[in-house]
Image (cartoon, rainbow, N blue to C red):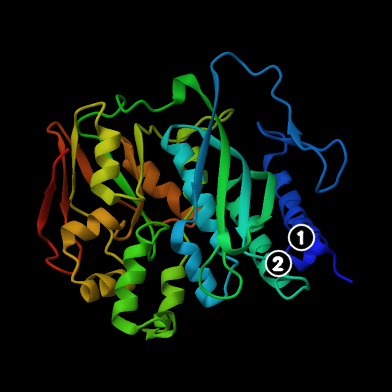
């Protein structure tokens, strides 16, 4: 007979099974930090046991900070498509790529998975296994270890599409050296801007995407075929994780870099104008971006369906861009990117006058110069 707690919708036995699956996935990530800052020590090996890192004897000038973020509403695409093995990339990209924005090295992640209910049988365990699979792969790509996590059954407080809605958030610990942190004042007139490509939509601006496609195709818009596959799979395309490339170029907590980097722009909410303005504000400089990546066909399709201007599109989405590196050595950056599975190209240059100028690759008026105030 089920306990009163299980009858209320929280089966602790099923939750323990789900927690163990996520722990076993996390344990495979410990190897990512072996011999480096953030190496995980487990006094006894169990998902309920303590996991710690030894930070004794760190040199003077060692810095530690944290990043917090979630997958936002992109997680609804995983619900809609019943495909959950890539959503961890969106989660990890949001926190790991914010760490390198500051000049740090992402090291340790903990996540909080809020679900409606696991039910009282094993029917949702395959979803947990998919999440765990993505957990492991994303951590390897970012070269981080998953030190801890939590699954919370929240009942009707968590809602969404389908019969297993969930929200997923994470906290990341990063380490850096004081002399290598970016202040914004390192950026110089004449520095090149190397853009790193994002295929499809990153984990931001998805509320607008869902509204446009829902208005055009109805509630089940995600099943509409576009080009070679359902529209929902195009929108679910995972966020690219750039942090390992940036750490290799700029140098990590204990490692030297291979190129001189003066600044990093992580292009998420607010798009190119907001994110560049924020990074350039301390220096008072501006940027002209004349050679951006073209947006994916699904992004242009969404822009046309919604009647979104190029100006608004570049303020809502990355439009093919996920991160920008500001550097006096752009050729080194472009040459290093392919070994990390990342496309890179020189997109523009830092100017002495404040402001952000974009030569549009959007659907409205490609080739038109759009000027955004600082």
Residue assigned mark 2: 118
Residue 345 visible? The answer is yes
Residue at (27% x, 41% y) in the render: 276
Please say if 246 is above or below 102: below
Left or right: 127 as drawn, with respect to 50: left
Residue 347 visible? The answer is no
- Quadrant of the drawing holding the C terminus: top left
Left or right: 246 as drawn, with respect to 124: left
Left or right: 62 as drawn, with respect to 41: left
Q: Nearer the viewer, residue 284 or 19?
A: 19
Residue at (71% x, 51% y) in the render: 26
Residue at (57% x, 47% y) in the render: 170
Please say if 194 is above or below 13: above
> Which image quadrant for residue 213?
bottom left
What's the mark number on residue 15?
1
Q: Looking at the picture, how far across and down is residue 272, in whole percent?
A: 26, 49
Q: Do callouts 1 and 2 mark residues in contact (Cβ within 8 Å)?
A: yes
Q: Looking at the picture, how far across and down is residue 255, in whole percent?
A: 56, 30
Q: Nearer the viewer, residue 151 or 340?
A: 151
Q: Secondary structure at mark 1?
A: helix
């Amino acid at each position: 007979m089920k306990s009163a707690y299980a009858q209320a919708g929280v089966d602790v036995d099923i939750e323990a099974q789900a927690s163990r699956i996520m722990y076993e996935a996390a344990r495979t990530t410990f190897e990512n930090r072996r011999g480096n800052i953030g190496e995980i020590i487990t006094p006894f090996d169990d998902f309920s046991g303590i996991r710690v890192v030894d930070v004794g004897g760190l040199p003077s000038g060692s810095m530690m900070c944290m990043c917090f973020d979630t997958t936002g509403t992109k997680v609804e695409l995983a619900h809609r498509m019943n495909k959950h093995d890539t959503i961890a990339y969106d989660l990890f990209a949001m926190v790991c790529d914010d760490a390198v924005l500051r000049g740090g090295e992402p090291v340790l992640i903990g996540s909080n998975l809020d679900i409606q209910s696991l039910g009282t049988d094993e029917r949702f365990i395959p979803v947990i296994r998919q999440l765990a699979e993505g957990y492991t792969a994303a951590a390897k790509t970012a070269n981080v270890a998953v030190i801890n996590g939590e699954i919370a059954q929240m009942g009707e407080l968590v809602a969404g599409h389908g019969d297993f809605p969930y929200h997923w958030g994470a906290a990341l610990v990063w380490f850096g050296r004081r002399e290598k942190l970016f202040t914004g004042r390192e950026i110089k007139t004449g520095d090149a801007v190397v853009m790193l490509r994002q295929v499809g939509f990153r984990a931001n601006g998805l509320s607008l995407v869902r509204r446009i496609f829902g208005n055009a195709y109805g509630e089940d818009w995600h099943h509409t075929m576009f080009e070679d596959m359902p529209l929902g799979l195009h929108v679910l395309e995972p966020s690219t994780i750039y942090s390992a490339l940036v750490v290799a170029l700029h140098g990590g907590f204990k490692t030297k870099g291979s190129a001189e980097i003066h600044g990093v722009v992580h292009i998420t909410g607010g798009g190119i104008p907001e994110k560049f303005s924020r990074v350039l504000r301390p220096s008072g400089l501006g940027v002209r971006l004349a050679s951006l990546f073209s947006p994916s066909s699904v992004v242009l399709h969404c822009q046309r369906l919604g009647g979104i201007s190029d100006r608004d599109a570049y303020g809502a989405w990355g439009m093919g861009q996920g991160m920008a590196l500001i550097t006096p050595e752009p050729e080194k950056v472009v040459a290093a990117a392919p070994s990390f599975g990342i496309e890179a190209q020189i997109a523009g240059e830092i100017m002495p006058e404040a402001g952000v100028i974009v030569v549009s690759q959007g659907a409205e008026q490609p080739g038109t110069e759009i000027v955004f105030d600082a």
